[in-house]
């Protein structure tokens, strides 16, 4: 019983410590994302993404990068662009860029995993887009694309006002929308983040290394020691494990850090991080938009691309002797709550968060703002909501156990 209580306390402490480490990065990322989404509209995007050529792919990638968002928002926007005339390939490029080439994800990765994984995330995001483009050109699924367009409602949404960015910056209504969008960003991810960080703490405290050695073969032998088939197993198992979860990419980063600390290959960890668009909720949403055949094709497209990308990254980093060393790397042993730069950054960005909430819900309480989101499953959302509440009870109990009982 004493051992369980000790592990419970450690799990809760680790989970809350992970979140404290990442809090300022979440606020910064969602603030930047909200600013971009309010001050940049889709009109310019849809006018320049109508073919599957190099220029269209570049613009789809660029617009995705500046429209960084969670996967559910990216699905809705890429569907909207495809519906309004963007090519299928450039829509996929937009979706991949807006979920992988994102500021907030890069910052979180740098905190938990280090600069090599940040470089891997951004270089890998571009490689994912190139691999997907190549597969689309090789397979050339014209009939599937035509059928997908027919499955979409052809009604064109009215475009937002096309005021210049300069006028929008001076508008108090625009800043109120930024505040509302910022709150919406948190509303979209709070359940995933809560469950993801709690699971990371539980895994770190309760799951033995032998489990990871069974799931990912030949772990802990050093990044340069992995053979091709071992790496292939790692990059397949990572996405398969992620497919069955409901946790988004931001909540998965602490888990990715734990996998790396347990000796999983760089390729396997990158594949796990890239798996946010091959999870079951995304498969179901794409089926709702385009039909099951196209949804399964997109799953095949992204799964194949992330396997190829993860292997390329591993061998590329190995070639330049840049593979990160996981030996002795443990983010669970840190003193997460000491007075350091993280403490002061968190205080500063909590003030920023308060200002944005004030602008959105007090100064701009009469301003209407709605952004299209992918249709989520009510059952899944309710399940995640209750899981999040259970997590809060678990975390509160664990902290009490650690501080008072033990």
Image: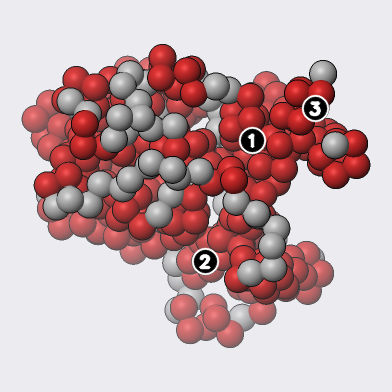
Q: Position of residue 292 (x, y in %)?
A: 38, 17
Task: Of the two numbered discs 1 and 3 on the same chain, state the one appearing first in sequence.
Answer: 3
Residue 19 position within the rendered picture, expressed as x and y whole percent measured from the top left: 65, 50
* Residue that label 3 marks: 5
Q: Quadrant of the C terminus?
A: top right
Name the residue that disc number 1 marks. Answer: 201
Residue 19 visible, this angle: no
**Under tag 2, what secondary structure?**
helix
Q: Estimate the x, y position of residue 317 in percent, counting from the top left.
A: 19, 47
Which secondary structure, mark 1? helix
Q: Is residue 279 left or right of residue 57?
A: right
**Comparing labels 2 and 1, the label whose residue is closer to the camera:** 1
Q: Which residue is mark 2?
A: 32
Instruction: Please determine whether, in this image, residue 112 is positioned above or below residue 224.
Output: below
Residue at image location 90% in from the left, 36% down from the top: 405
Where's residue 387, x and y in %?
Answer: 72, 27
Q: Residue at 78% across / 65% down in the picture?
A: 361
């Amino acid at each position: 019983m004493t051992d369980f209580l000790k592990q419970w306390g450690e799990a809760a402490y680790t989970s809350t410590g992970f979140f404290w480490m990442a809090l300022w990065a979440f606020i910064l990322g969602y603030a930047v994302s909200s600013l971009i989404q309010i001050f940049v509209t889709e009109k310019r995007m849809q006018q320049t993404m109508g073919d599957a050529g190099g220029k269209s792919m570049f613009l789809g990638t660029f617009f995705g990068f500046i429209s960084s968002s969670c996967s559910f928002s990216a699905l809705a926007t890429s569907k909207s662009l495809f519906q309004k005339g963007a090519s299928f390939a450039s829509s996929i490029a937009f979706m991949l860029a807006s979920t992988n080439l994102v500021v907030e994800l890069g910052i979180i990765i740098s905190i938990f995993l280090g600069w090599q994984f940040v470089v891997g995330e951004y270089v890998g995001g571009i490689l994912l887009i190139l691999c997907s483009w190549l597969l689309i050109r090789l397979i050339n699924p014209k009939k599937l694309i035509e059928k997908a367009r027919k499955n979409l409602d052809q009604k064109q949404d009215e475009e937002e006002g096309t005021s210049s960015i300069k006028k929008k910056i001076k508008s108090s209504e625009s800043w109120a929308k930024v505040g509302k969008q910022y709150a919406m960003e948190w509303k979209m991810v709070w359940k995933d983040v809560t469950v993801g960080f709690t699971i990371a703490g539980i895994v770190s405290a309760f799951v033995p290394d032998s489990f990871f050695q069974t799931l990912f073969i030949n772990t802990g032998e050093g990044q340069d020691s992995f053979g091709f088939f071992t790496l292939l197993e790692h990059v397949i198992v990572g996405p398969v494990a992620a497919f069955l979860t409901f946790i988004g990419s931001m909540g998965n980063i602490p888990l990715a850090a734990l996998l790396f600390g347990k000796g999983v290959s760089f390729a396997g960890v990158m594949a796990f991080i890239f798996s946010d668009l091959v999870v079951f909720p995304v498969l179901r949403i794409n089926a709702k938009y385009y039909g099951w055949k196209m949804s399964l094709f997109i799953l095949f497209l992204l799964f194949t691309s992330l396997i190829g990308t993860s292997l390329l990254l591993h061998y590329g980093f190995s070639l330049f002797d840049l593979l990160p060393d996981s030996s002795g790397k443990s983010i669970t042993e840190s003193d997460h709550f000491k007075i350091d730069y993280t403490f002061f950054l968190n205080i500063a960005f909590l003030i920023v968060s308060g200002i944005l909430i004030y602008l959105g819900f007090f100064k701009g309480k009469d301003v209407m703002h709605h952004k299209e989101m992918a249709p989520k499953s009510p059952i899944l959302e309710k399940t995640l909501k209750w899981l999040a509440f259970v997590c809060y009870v678990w975390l509160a109990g664990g902290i009490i156990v650690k501080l008072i009982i033990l």
